[in-house]
Image (cartoon, coloured by chain):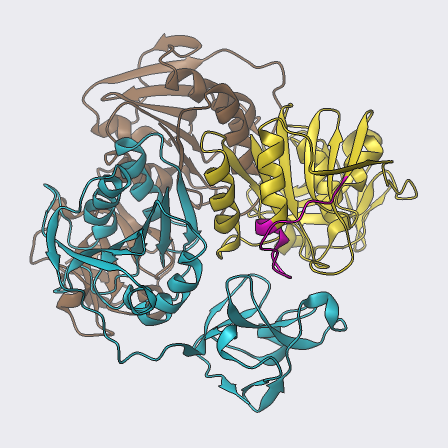
Chain colours: A cyan, B yellow, C brown
Amino acid sequence: MIVLFTDFGPCGPYVGQMKGVLYRSNPGVPVIDLLADAPTFDPRASAYLLAAYAADFAPPVVFLCVIDPGVGGSRAPVAVKVDGRWFVGPDNGLFNVVGMRGREVEWWDVTWRPQRLTATFHGRDLFAPVAARLARGEVPPGERRDARIDRSWPEDDRRIIYIDHFGNAITGIRAAAVGDGARLSLGGRTIARARTYADVPEGQSFWYENANGLAEIAVNRGSASEALGLRLGDTVTIA
Amino acid sequence: MIVLFTDFGPCGPYVGQMKGVLYRSNPGVPVIDLLADAPTFDPRASAYLLAAYAADFAPPVVFLCVIDPGVGGSRAPVAVKVDGRWFVGPDNGLFNVVGMRGREVEWWDVTWRPQRLTATFHGRDLFAPVAARLARGEVPPGERRDARIDRSWPEDDRRIIYIDHFGNAITGIRAAAVGDGARLSLGGRTIARARTYADVPEGQSFWYENANGLAEIAVNRGSASEALGLRLGDTVTIA
Amino acid sequence: MIVLFTDFGPCGPYVGQMKGVLYRSNPGVPVIDLLADAPTFDPRASAYLLAAYAADFAPPVVFLCVIDPGVGGSRAPVAVKVDGRWFVGPDNGLFNVVGMRGREVEWWDVTWRPQRLTATFHGRDLFAPVAARLARGEVPPGERRDARIDRSWPEDDRRIIYIDHFGNAITGIRAAAVGDGARLSLGGRTIARARTYADVPEGQSFWYENANGLAEIAVNRGSASEALGLRLGDTVTIA
């Protein structure tokens, strides 16, 4: 199974071009669109999101991850194996959180280069062919290295790192790290915890542990983003 | 074949997480995104849409349907078989129209619970595994019940229940229930019927029987939604 | 492999209904969403886009293309084979650029009609079944004709023909047709060429040869569309 995690957006030809490469190489391997609207140009916020969602996919799985504003520049292409799951993409921090939280980390610099390597679409030209190989059980075409993990990053990201279609605001804070009775504060408001939507009146805001373990701010049958004026990157404090 | 019908939106990680479950269980079974932007929080409008689209998929097929604002509350999970097609999701009215129009209805309450059942994502934790089983030909993990169908619902929904990418406004009215010469009225305007876009001048509004049998309001090479100021939920009358 | 190229938008039930037909006919053949937001009602701009992307998919491949504002009117359904790649859709100019640039072109008028042929969704009723047959290696259900290619079209389209999720503006001009030192002008501005994002300062605009060979206008870590006020259809001149 190959799982796509990008900031390419819901439209456009980029995901399809990568799938063309993947299905041509491995016709029988399912390719899953996990996220196509990861925070644009923000590998760090994406790294916390990726860590939350990756846990949901048991090995064997290959995550093909392209949040790559430095494409064509000096950042390295890497393949990282964390507790049995492969991650392929640019070495720009995108895999730092899965690395920090992992027990067993294998790090490979990808040194193979394809015949056609455009300056701006390594997702299609470089990362997709590598992901296809890993999905076939091959080793990464590169060199095994010591893992380059920056352990100075905070354990959780106390910002809003994703806002979904319903207007729910997902933070980078794991709910398990927050006391049950804790409130979240942002923009002068304080928000109490609930278990699920149906547990609060319609129109009321609350926070809860979402289905991937993150603290998420919502409004029952409404948009937290609109009601509370929340934006990507807003800082959240635990009260 | 498993067909997804949700209000999760065109982006976000929810559809991908459900597909992860489905492809892991049944690698060879195609999963089709039918609709990801069903009317949010509105199982009733969605029920009329679902009935129109479901007819297009011949059995064997499993519809995995998640318009579920009451997730984690008291509504039951159900698996309903209507004329050979399976529908899995919350018992909140979403399957009432397929049930009303069906000839043979089998109704199961899903009593099985997975090891991990989060309070807010039954689509991934409960409905997807059940859909995967049904797609393998298994019986629903639950108890056969009398069908709970509310026959007080109108046969058609005289509202705009979907607006598409072109700005076409789809009503919940089956065109077969409307006379050929009938006009539709909404917001003080009256709109005549045509067969297709090319049959009216550019910029003219008309209504027609869409490819799924519903009365749909359109403008040739334009957006009916913008031109006529139409919004989801607007009431339509047959003149 | 069947590749979808439409203006159906990122949401809505149309792509899913076509996939229902395709997977029912050919369960094991991958179906790839290449583009769902081709310029609405504009087969000509779409024709230049299609030619750029099609080159990326080696035969055997079937492109199922539906930008079809004249659906149900007099335009013919066609199946065109260009250098080993099949294209199926309406004869409204959509295949004119691949035809102009092709070495070997086979042109078929599709004369077969399905039992159910709605007036407004030939994508599902007519083109998808034909694409499924071609993907199985069958000949088109129709009549071989002389290719109807309009060679009066310009070799490149000097307009912005697509704006992507990042706000990058893709022109219909092949970069190979432009000198390395050439600048692009539009709206009173003149833009210089660079190789990739990382080669210019943050916030600076530039143009480059994109991964499909087209001249594309971008801003490093920003939106060219917003920064420069670009819109679909804007004319570009080579300075």
Q: Which residue corresponds to the image point at 42% horizontal and 44% vertical from the top-left?
A: A32
On the rendered structure, is B57 left or right of C101? right
In magenta segment, residue B127:
no
Residue A218 image offset from top left, x and y in percent: 62, 71
Residue reaching furthest to the top:
C143
Q: Which residue corresponds to the image point at 63% horizontal and 32% vertical from the top-left?
A: B134
Nearer to the camera, C36 or B216: C36
- The quarter in which the C terminus of chain A is drawn is bottom right
The prevailing secondary structure element of the residues shown in magenta is loop
Residue B204 image offset from top left, x and y in percent: 64, 43
The image quarter in which residue C89 lies: top left
Q: Which residue corresponds to the image point at 25% horizontal and 24% vertical from the top-left?
A: C59
Q: Is residue A78 visible?
A: yes
Q: Which residue corresponds to the image point at 48% horizontal and 49% vertical from the top-left?
A: B16
Nearer to the camera, C49 or B184: C49
- Residue stretch in magenta: B109-125
Q: Is residue C75 visible?
A: no
Residue B230 image offset from top left, x and y in percent: 69, 55
- The quarter in which the N terminus of chain A is drawn is top left
In magenta segment, residue B119:
yes
Residue C15 image offset from top left, x and y in percent: 51, 37
Residue reaching furthest to the right:
B152
C223 is higher (above) or lower (below) than C145: below
On the rendered structure, is A89 left or right of C163? left
On the rendered structure, is C66 left or right of C103? right
Nearer to the camera, B135 or C214: B135
